[in-house]
Amino acid sequence: MRVQTMAKTLVLAEKPSVGRELARVLGCRQGGNGYLSGGQYIVTWALGHLVELAEPEAYGEQYKTWSMDTLPMLPEKMELKVIPETSKQYSVVKKLLHSPEVGSLVIATDAGREGELVARWILEKAGFHKPVKRLWISSQTDRAIREGFANLKDGKAYYNLYMSAQSRAEADWLVGLNVTRALTCKFNAQLSAGRVQTPTLALLVQREEEIRRFVPKDYYTVRADLGNFFVTWHNGKNQTAISDKEKADAIAEKIREKKFRITEVKKTFGSTPPPMLYDLTELQRDANKLYQYSPKQTLNIMQRLYETHKALTYPRTDSRYLTADLVPTLPERLRAVNHGEFGPIVGEIFRTRKSISHACVNNAKVTDHHAIIPTEEQVNLLSLNQEERRIYTLVVKRFLTCFYPSYDFKKIRVELTAEGESFSAAGREIIELGWKKVEKGIEEDEEEAAEQVLPNLRQGDSFVCKNIQLKAQKTAPPARYTEATLLSAMENPSKFIEDKKMKEYIGGGLGTPATRADIIEKLFSSFYVEKRGNSLVPTSKGMQLIGLVPPDLKEPLLTARWEQRLEGISQGKENRGAFIKEIKGYATALVKTVASSEATYVHENMTQKICPECGKHLLMVNTKKGKMLVCQDRECGYRRNVVTETRVRCPNCHKFMELFGEGDNKTFACRCGFRSKADKFFESREKRSSASKRDVQQYLRNQNQKKDPGVSAFAAAWAKSLEAAKKKGSE
């Protein structure tokens, strides 16, 4: 008699690391090629995306050549393709999906829009039609995984989320690829544009233009030292700036060594509630302010804390609230962080029986995921690197502040007169420190920063002026964006739009918390933006691009409203078909606008060197491995390396050097000023090492190839010889 075996459930994770953790909890210990198997489950994984939207070439031979004649590209149905680099794992997953051993599937990719897309595209491409469940959890702890599998959701409940994700991807394809090809063909330059990327760049360009137009004005302030505190002149309307230097000088002389009398001491009560819990964007902002971490860097750190260390909950959230059902889990989360610098704070919370602020709990303001908070799993802080400890500390402290009362204080404002002139001083008296026992605040407001500790002052008190400070100042231009303030602008672009009518209509932000970091990174990689200190400055290429793109594309209004519609699709309130139809019409209009443009593009990186193929001037461009000369004519395609980053260290400062030139003229150069012809440099090293001339020649050949120069024959021989020299020296 044949025994019928029970069908297994296939679990699809987004990454191998997450897949292995799920497999461990589910008891899947039998290893396979790209999967782990157990009695009830088989766990496999993607490698990020395994499937993506097909490139234009898939829709016809005519699209292999970039030409205005083939635009706009508007496929009737968007095709999917397997990504070549991850095709091996796709084959593994596809085979498992169609295995007779598998009766159903659990989607266990990241619980968000992009995670849903990762899984659904694989299923669609593979032609999978078996029952689907969804694992939807906000942390990767063993407990969360077990509870999640005990409460799996019907996959159909997340179909609208998939439709939203697919609509976003198709919209970006239709707008981005059409406009990029149109701009590149029209202006014969490597230009790109996108639905979110371009209005974000436009914010930076607008700010740069405001700075360039700004004309500074001189002004003066008069400050008097009364011994125990300082007072500042004002005109009776709290305006402290004096535009006329003669007037400022006259006031300063008038009050010198004169008596000041207090006319009023005004005290007002103030209270600041605890800050809201972190969502991803707010965390990225604070990490940039405090540690200059890029948004992408912070997201990567958060992913490790979520996936590997299981210390924090799901990072890609846009909510700063918790749901009521999480409140019973908070004592356990507090116990999990009851160590190190957090110990005394947690101890006080338990000792005084503090409860979380009601303001932090709101079911209506949580959609897919709640705010970022610690998990119930205790973390060994020594297992975290510096980056991870910093981000973990930020989240834990913000979580703990929600158990503390408001920061209460008295604002003190003192008004004084001297020789008919008005002066004032401001201070603050703390009543209840409240949440500031835990977290002082990432940035104090300007008013608080300007306040001073005042002595006990009463109306009628008088003081003699000890000293006068007459300070000459200039009005400052608007500050350039940092990555922190750019995130704020992307989250709420209406704050940064001057047009009052547009302010009224703009809805959502530019992109989502999960995509904003990638958008900013793309601006850097496309050479549209560069960093000066912590400030973001648009390049000449970025400034020109905003002048070339159609006006609609650079306004945040339209794309912000589209983000709202995508959210509506995910909730079943918007029609996906109508949205894509609108996007196609928009892409068509953009192409027409670019094609009819009479503008010109000037290459800011033009050199005097001539292309040997077509005779046009060459452009100097930065690559990941150095500098390269490329022909300005895209159709010519000529390029050659001129500066290559090496793993050879400078003999003076020991930093990695760059290699310039070609053939016999190859020269090593360092930022410290050291320069040496490559052959002479190696000859001098050869005397002190066992590296042969053959090794040297091999090294030089490798510089022209797409290999890591750090693994060259010379480098290996040199390192070996240095080690031998050290040994000899020690003997």
Image (cartoon, rainbow, N blue to C red):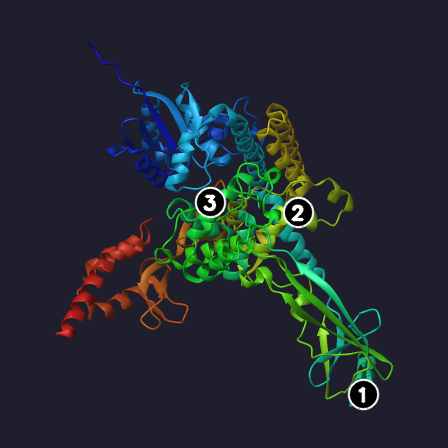
Q: Which residue is mark 2?
A: 493
Whether pointer 2 and pointer 3 mark residues with C-beta atoms closer than 8 Å, the reply is no
Report the disc number at residue 313.
3
Q: CA distance from mark 1 to mark 3?
A: 61 Å
Q: Secondary structure at mark 1?
A: strand
Binning the other alpha carbons within 10 Å of mark 3 as few (below 14), some (14 to 19) or many (20 upward) gives: many
> Separation of disc 1 and disc 2 at Cα?
51 Å
Specify which label sits upstream in the sequence, 1 or 2: 1
Q: Position of residue 91 (x, y in %)?
A: 32, 27
Which of the numbered marks, if any, corresponds to residue 259?
A: 1
What is the quadrant of the C terminus in the image? bottom left
The picture places residue 365, in percent across and down from the top left corner, at 61, 40
- Residue drawn at x 47%, y 59% is 347
Q: Is residue 5 above or below residue 701?
A: above
> Residue at left 34%, top 61%?
666
The quarter in which the N terminus is drawn is top left
Residues 231 and 432: in front is: 432
For the point 39% across and 51% down, the residue is: 378
Element type at mark 3: loop
Q: Nearer the viewer, residue 419 or 342?
A: 342
Residue 283 visible from this viewpoint: yes
